[in-house]
Amino acid sequence: MPREIEIWFTNYNGRFYVIAEYASSQWVENLRANREATLRVKNMSFPVTARVLSPEADSDLNRIVQDLSRKKYGWGDGLVVELVPESLHVQ
């Protein structure tokens, strides 16, 4: 059954990033179980594929996204999740 949450995001290189305060958050577990989701920003909705960033393997991107979030919202600690719009998927 689809779920909808409202969450702050940052945008970087055409991809969207959200940060979970806790890695065990239910919405993170849902995206780990099913990477396909729909993202709605204002009046636009589009399919995305989610990927939880690894703080070790994706350290540079993780740091960039956390810094962008700190600049935009004043916080950036937590688990970073990347949402890639279907239009960016390589065929």
Image (cartoon, helix red, strand yellow):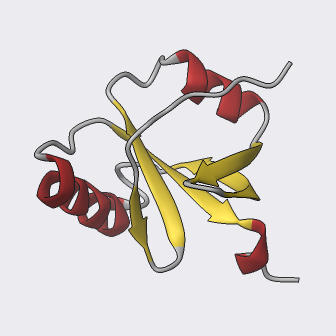
Q: Residue at horizontal 37%, vertical 22%?
A: 22
In front here: 68 or 43? 43
- Check the picture and name the quadrant holding the C terminus: bottom right
Q: Is residue 35 above or below residue 12?
A: above
Q: How many marks?
A: 0
In front here: 15 or 61? 15
**Apparent side of residue 33 relative to residue 4 in the rendered image (left or right):** right
**Apparent side of residue 55 relative to residue 7 in the rendered image (left or right):** left
**Apparent side of residue 36 relative to residue 18 in the rendered image (left or right):** right
Residue 77, position as x, y percentages in the image: 21, 39
Q: Is residue 31 above or below residue 63?
A: above
In front here: 7 or 50? 7
Q: Residue at horizontal 75%, vertical 43%?
A: 35
- Check the picture and name the quadrant holding the N terminus: top right
Q: Residue lying farthest front? A: 43
**What is the quadrant of residue 20 in the picture?**
top left
Residue 38, position as x, y percentages in the image: 74, 47
Q: Is residue 68 above or below residue 31?
A: below
Q: Residue at horizontal 43%, vertical 25%?
A: 23
In front here: 73 or 67? 73
